[in-house]
Every structure is written in structure tokens, then in C-alpha cells.
Image (cartoon, helix red, strand yellow):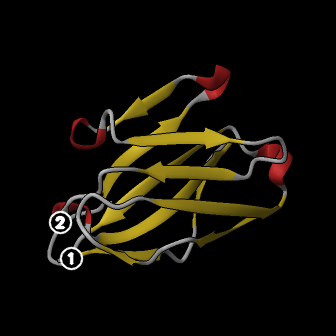
Amino acid sequence: QVQLRESGGDSVQPGGSLRLSCEPSGNIFDIINMGWFRQAPGKARERVAQIWSRDRREYAESVKGRFTISREHGNKLYLQMNNLKLEDTAVYYCQADVLHATYWGQGTQVTVSS
């Protein structure tokens, strides 16, 4: 079992920055891949950024050049979000893959408004 706890969500103006964190606990050495997803009201959950094994990183087209995903020893995961836009408003979820299972955090709210 893996537990994930996100933090760092807040309300910001367009053009602002936020840094989300995800603290894993439990069987953290079983974690293979980690990522960030988001879900806006009335929309499906979508992948924002992912770190695959061997540190390969992947971003949604809508966030390329603005968001950066990183992962520390111990599997703590971050999402640096710069130049935030209104359409980035969503609940952001941390995700972790282990063999035969995927775990999710409870989510942290990011609101971008003027």
C-alpha cells in the first residue's frame, strides 16, 4: 500500500506561480512511476506531467514550457507551475504506479482567477 499526500494548492492570479508537493508514505520503494493529474469542474481527469522509469518526463501539450515535474530521493514529487492561466484551475492529484496497482492522493485545489 502507498499513501500520497498533496500540498501547495492555492488561489493565484494569472501569470503567477505555485509549487505542488506530493509526499508518499507506506511501501514507497515499490513505486515505479509518478505523475500529476488534474480535474476541472465538469471535465475528465487528465494527465499533466509524468516521470517514468529512468527519469523520462512527459508533459501535456497545454503545460509544456510552463510546468516542471521533479522527483526527489524518497520519491517526494513536485510540480512547479509558472505562468499560470485561468484554464489551469482544477483539483490536482498525485499518482503513483506500483506493480499491478495505481494509487492516488486526495487532491489539492489550484484556482487561477483575476
The residue positioned 64% from the left and 61% from the top of the image is 22
Mark 1 — residue?
113
| Residue 73 spot, x, y in % from top left | 83, 41
Asked if 71 appears above or below 92 in the picture, the reply is above
Badge 2: few (under 14), some or many (20 or more) residues near its Cα, within 10 Å?
some
Asked if 57 appears above or below 68 in the picture, the reply is above
The residue positioned 52% from the left and 41% from the top of the image is 69
Using the rendered view, name the quadrant where residue 34 is placed: top right
| Residue 89 spot, x, y in % from top left | 26, 70
| Residue 46 spot, x, y in % from top left | 29, 54
| Residue 5 spot, x, y in % from top left | 66, 72
Which amino acid lies under the numbered mark 2 shown in the image of this protein?
Answer: Leu
Say left or right for 38 vs 99: left
The residue positioned 57% from the left and 70% from the top of the image is 105
The residue positioned 61% from the left and 40% from the top of the image is 70
Say left or right for 85 vs 57: left
**Is residue 69 in view?**
yes
Q: Quadrant of the C terminus?
A: bottom left
**Is residue 101 in view?**
no
Secondary structure type for disc 2: helix
Is the C-beta separation of discs 2 and 1 under 8 Å? Answer: yes
Using the rendered view, name the quadrant where residue 41 is placed: bottom left
Looking at this view, is 21 or 66 the one in front? 66
Q: Quadrant of the N terminus?
A: bottom right
Q: Which mark is residue 92?
A: none
Which amino acid lies under the numbered mark 1 shown in the image of this protein?
Answer: Ser
Using the rendered view, name the quadrant where residue 111 is placed: bottom left
Badge 1: few (under 14), some or many (20 or more) residues near its Cα, within 10 Å?
some
Measured Cα–Cα span from mark 2 to mark 1? 6 Å
Mark 2 — residue?
86
